[in-house]
Image (spheres, rainbow, N blue to C red):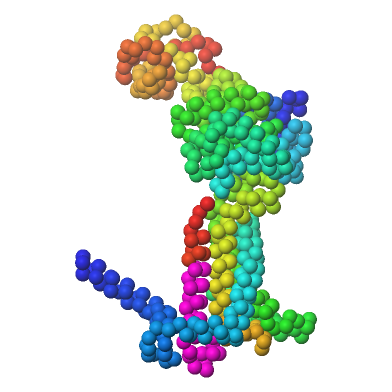
Amino acid sequence: MAARARFAFTVLAFGYAFLYLPIALVIVYSFNDSRLVTVWAGFSTKWWSALFANEAMLSAAWLSLRIAFVSATAAALIGLAAGYALARAPRFPGRTLFGSLVIAPMVMPEIVMGIAMLLLFVGSDSLLGGPQRGFLTIVIAHTTFAIAFVAVVVQARLADFDRSLEEAAMDLGATPWTAFLTVTLPMIAPAVASGWLLAFTLSLDDLVLTQFVAGAQSQTLPMQVYSSVRLGVDPQINALATLIVIVAVLALTTSGWLTRRRI
Amino acid sequence: MTAAAIVTLTGLAKRFGSVTAVERVDLEIRRGELFALLGGSGCGKTTLLRMIAGFETPDQGRILIDGQDMTGVPPHRRPVNMMFQSYALFPHMDVAANVGYGLRRDGLPAPEIARRVGEALKQVRLGDLGERRPAQLSGGQRQRVALARALVKRPKLLLLDEPLAALDRKLREATRFELVRLQEELGLTFVMVTHDQEEAMSMASRLAVMDKGRIEQVGPPHEVYERPASRFVADFIGIANILPLDGGRAWLALRPEKIALFAARPDTDHAEQGRIVDIAYEGDRSLYRVGLLDGSLLQVSTANTARIAAAFRRGDDVWLGWAADAGHRLDK
Ligand SMILES: Nc1ncnc2c1ncn2[C@@H]1O[C@H](COP(=O)(O)OP(=O)(O)OP(=O)(O)O)[C@@H](O)[C@H]1O
Ligand SMILES: [Mg+2]
């Protein structure tokens, strides 16, 4: 028994080390005094100061946050509508197909999405003269991609939602829209918020899709990081990575907590 | 349509795919009565109620409420409220907000809402629980919140889907009287669905017995019990011995309590000889199954008015006697 427990524990430790040691090293070395990523030369916060003085990095981060906020909000609204329709629409032929089509972007290679989006924007540019590639096109691409995640979360929540609650609201004089706003929405709000956070995180660190649809002017944070790493790694990147890890962990734990919470 | 009718259903029918849930129902419900819809599981009671409330669209037929055709009128514009089988309390609102929900939809001023919510909670004896969430209530308390929420709008018609089914036996019996008291005090019309015949018999002023989407019989409880319209009704309401008449073209429904047991041949209008096959002692009464000479079984019940042991035992040879008017002739 003890041997087995020890063995299981060892396997577990290896697994977690494999997953999290690189991240832990990134965090630790953001406080390294040396420029060399591989040599520990004492504790220092100078790379953090350098990061907060790095204009290019900061403006890329600001752009990414704005894109993530707008696209997550758009995806939450559209995904809510899609999830609601999928959970509530009466059965019709081809409904399964519709359901799969909504969630397809979750499993579609990003390269394919990227090419498709690029073709769309090139086409609309020559036909309609816009939109200019940049903020708007990135937001549209990220929204398209994230709708699926919100729709899936909302649909799952509505699947075990007691429909007689909505009927009771209408029976008491609520129009279908009021019933949705006063009964359904407050009860599925945690699922929508959790979908929003998921969309926000996905947008914040997306590189592949963004590369296709960003114009020459728009450098998102992942793009900026990627290009600066190609010129040689600097522990500033470690500091930045640490920040991103913190944001992602916060978003994902909040999202998980919201999803589990039942009201 | 009689002047007293508050609901008139004509030729109402509803199918779900290949299942006929409700089939050509004609029914009138009178103002101020407590009407029970009684029937086995899946016979279409809930579907009928949901059509009156507006949650299902009839395939055929018409619904008049207070003389107005309800075709195409959505649930929120019908002068009807419903108490759901699952209660359907809003879990994210406290009890007072649940009860006041319908009044807020009508746009009443806040003090008026507070007053009427307090009044409704008092009516169902929940005066001090307004701030609790539904999850913090017992089953019986939830049932009363659901009732208060449906009553507070003073609907012309209150529909109740199995209002007592989720309560335990003792509470159910106490709540029966409570419901009847409220219905009489407020002068409302109740239409109650139930599959419990005892509940329907003891509460309703009139009841309808349903089978496979059709209404088999409508009438006051004593009439349905003493003069059932068909073998189904006779068998569904209480216990009935069904004896063939006229070579199988008609039947006689004979209630167990209308038959008496004798040790020797009695001088009643009818007398049959048999042997007791078994006895079910139920405290207040005993139910005997007696095998007749022709092999058929009859059920006989006697009230246990004395505390002495029963006069008859299993295996005893006995005589059964009943009066000429004890049974009721059935043609279907
Ligand atoms: N939405 C629906 N879709 C398909 N079939 C349905 C639907 N609602 C009811 N039915 C069917 O219609 C028939 C009548 O159902 P209904 O719920 O009215 O019965 P009930 O008398 O209320 O039964 P119970 O006592 O079990 O509640 C059943 O065969 C049921 O399976
Ligand atoms: Mg039912």
- Res B229 → quadrant: top right
The picture places residue B138, in percent across and down from the top left corner, at 47, 38
Check the picture and name the quadrant holding the N terminus of chain B.
top right
The picture places residue A63, in percent across and down from the top left corner, at 63, 79
Front residue of this view, candidates B281 and A227: A227
Can residue B85 be seen here? The reply is no
Check the picture and name the quadrant holding the C terminus of chain B.
top right
| Extreme residue in the bottom direction | A231
| Extreme residue in the top direction | B267
**Labels in figure, total:** 0
- Res B63 → quadrant: top right
The picture places residue A200, in percent across and down from the top left corner, at 57, 71
Residue B56 part of the magenta segment: no
Q: Residue at x 51, y 31 (%)?
A: B196
The picture places residue B3, in percent across and down from the top left corner, at 76, 24
Q: Residue at x 31, y 19 (%)?
A: B315
The relative height of residue B174 versus residue B22 in the rendered view (above or below) is: above
- Res B191 → quadrant: top right
Q: Residue at x 59, y 82 (%)?
A: A58
Q: Which residues are magenta?
A: A225-252
The relative height of residue A68 versus residue B60 in the rendered view (above or below) is: below
Front residue of this view, candidates A93 and A174: A174
How would you classify the magenta stretch by its main secondary structure? Answer: helix
Q: Residue at x 67, y 87 (%)?
A: A217
The relative height of residue B318 versus residue B279 in the rendered view (above or below) is: above
Can residue B295 be seen here? The reply is yes
The relative height of residue B190 versus residue A215 in the rendered view (above or below) is: above
Image side of residue B215 versus residue B174, left or right: right
Front residue of this view, candidates A220 and B320: A220
Residue A239 part of the magenta segment: yes
